[in-house]
Image (tube, rainbow, N blue to C red):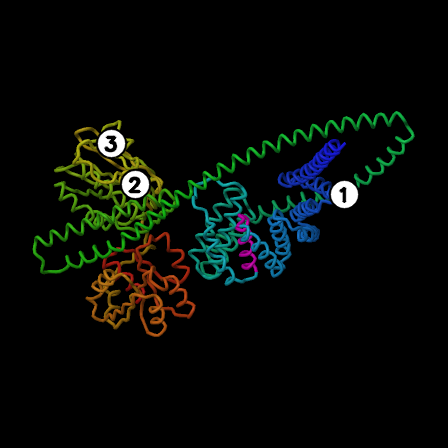
Amino acid sequence: MQRFLICTFLLQNILTHAQKQVKEDSLYFFLEKSYKGYEESNYLESLVWGRKLLEKAYRLKDSSYVAEAYYVLGLVDETIQDYDKAEDKYYNALKIVSKVSKKRDSVFLMDIYNGLANVYSFKKKYHKADSLYHKALEIGELLNNEAQKDIILNISWNYLSENSCQKVNLFLPELLSYQIKDDNRTLSLDDTIFFSDLNFVLGWYYGKIKEYNLAYDKLDFAIKLAKSKNLYQELSQVLEIRAKFLKAQGKFEEALFFNEKYIESHKKQIDQNLLKKLQAEKVKYEVSEYERALRLLKKQKQLSASIAESNHKLSWLYLILSIILGVSLIIIYLVNYKRKKLIRKLNHKNKLLIDAQKKAKLATQIKSNFISNISHELRTPLHGVIGITSLLLAEKKLSASNQKLLESLKFSGDYLLGLISNVLLMSKIDNGKVKVKQKLVMIESLLSTIRSGIMFSAEEKDVQIKFCVDEEIPKKVYLDANIVSEVLINLIENAIKFSKGGNVTTYIKINKDANCTDKEVTIRFCVEDNGTGIPKDKQEIIFQKFSQIASERNMLEGTGIGLSLVKSLLLQLGTDIKLESEIGKGSKFYFDLPCKLFSDKDSNVSISKEKLKVFESNLNILLVEDNKINMMVIQKYLASYKKINLEIISDGKEAYKAILNQDYDLVLLDINIPSMNGFAITKKIRKKGFKLPIIAVTASELTEIQDKAYAVGINDIIIKPFQKKKLIAVISKYLQ
């Protein structure tokens, strides 16, 4: 008897668990159907399944699913712009969830707050929306949930709508960190909308604080994203705000152009909105018809029940139908169970893939950080080596042997700096951080820079260097001088290495086979040597990273990244490297580059004697630097200007106090300073209202610090190591 009771108790538990599982699966099925209808824009279907879920959840007294039903119904009402009904349903969900103390409801609670905030924002009740957004954000931060990105974007948008730009500063670092890293990757519709809205908010913010260049950069990228998916609502808001900023700057012609684009896009947006409005009205009508059909169906059921009671045959028919329905439910349950099992397997596989992706990203980031840190640590002593060598070479009383030694030392320092720059540049290319910056360049000045960079190695190898510039080449064109010079120096250095005692000639001419206009020409850059040549089976390998093809020991020089770097840089410019080579006769590397022509409206700013007159008056300059070698180099650079009073401080807090209490004309500020770094010093100084020029002097990589530097109020940045000419040019620029 006791054994039977135990078996009966176990059987009862199993049946109870099975009934509970059926209940849960049934409610989940309704919820999934409702969400599926919403995601497919079939709002009537979503409402039907949502109401079924609400009724059944109330009947089964399942508070969690009641809240879920109210939330999905509120989503539909919000989408069809019935904001009052959406508000009621969201609040019903909130009341229920607030009473349930389960961890799985925390994310759901965040979603409800965010939905309510959206509704109040649409109603232009910004203060109420702000309060709810922050409640959602608090939960997101506690859970470290990915959705907090959308909430922060919503909050910033809300602040800008009520003209509270200062409040946006609190979230600016997060907004900047969300920016897309790879401009060429394929985005989903949701990602496109997010990144378009993100750049719109950033552009709106920068325009509000009159940082127009940054504003236009962000707004133009938002326009590009919106156009890619025909997002006319997003496109219209960006074009409208861009036109307003241009008008505020007095650029009326450009403002008129963007205003016309806004009107054109707004018309298309109105057409889309009208279509959505018609769809919303259609859904409301269908819902009304559905409710009327429900009432009619209820009456029909009552009539059928009455007839069934009086008709025995109909009872049998209902029994058969019930059996069929039962079998169908069992089949549906089994299918649903298998589908859920499959989903669990897929989710597990997806999790493994995501973990692998995170590990790969982490490894890439670690590599990038390592290279950046090593670069910073090497640049600082190199600044001292190159600076001191340059100062010694400027001395008039030098013996020929010492001058030769110093020239060799300077070449070695420059070579090491170039190697560090190449490794760092390759890392930046791999991480998609290289940006092409076209500017007006004099071809002769570009070649002079290249010539000075390669002459020492040419003399060492007894190689004759020639530059042949076609007469048709314009004196000034627009191109990225840094990338082009880096490419040509690497090509010439490579040619020198394999042409000992030979000739290396660089040809620059117009490619007449390409389309040339009065505004743009295609220039062919060609580096030709009469060296050993490259076998055909090796001509693809040489462009791979760290590859070397020389068989002789004395030819195995360099790191093997030069030609790989050339190819990667040219791809950034939208072109590619070509190679023609024959064993024993030499090699020819060339590439074509479209360049915009110089017009009379453009100007070319250079350091003039008039600008240097600023050093004829008394100047008080503060140098904040903790490296004694760097102190000495800068001190020597400025020693020839007798009117400059240079004060040096090596501690951040002391420097901050000195700026507050002394009258300086300009500050040269290292970023990594003990007790208070350069960013903190500048931020505090700007808050006090000081307008004096602050120039960052740092060994950090420019792209890693420039956004933060300009955000806190730093005027300009000089990257170590640098020449005296660069320092004087920057100082004169800000003391005019």
Sort mark 2 into few (<14), some (14-19) or many (20+) by Cα contacts within 10 Å. many
Considering the image in quadrants, where does the N terminus appear? top right
* Label number found at residue 59: 1
Residue drawn at the location 25% of the way across and 27% of the way down:
536
The type of residue carrying mark 2 is Leu
Residue 278 on image: x %, y %: 67, 44
Q: Secondary structure at mark 3?
A: strand
Single out the mark in the foreground, 3 or 2.
2
Secondary-structure class at tag 1: helix
Amino acid type of the residue that numbered disc 1 sits on in the rendered structure: Arg
User: Dot 1 surroundings within 10 Å: few (below 14), some, or many (20 or more)?
Assistant: few
Going by the numbered disc 3, the residue's amino acid type is: Glu
Mark 3 or mark 2: which comes first in sequence? 2
Q: Label 2: which residue?
A: 565
Magenta span contains residue 479: no
> Is residue 164 placed above or below 424 in the rendered structure?
below
Residue 148 drawn in magenta: yes
Distance (Cα) linking label 1 and label 2: 69 Å
Kindly identify which numbered label has been placed on residue 567. Answer: none
Image side of residue 42 versus residue 365, left or right: right
Specify start and end residues of the magenta stretch as a single range: 144-161
Q: Residue furthest right?
A: 310
Q: Position of residue 302 (x, y in %)?
A: 86, 36
Q: Main secondary structure of the magenta part?
A: helix
Q: Are marks 3 and 2 in contact (CB under 8 Å)?
A: no
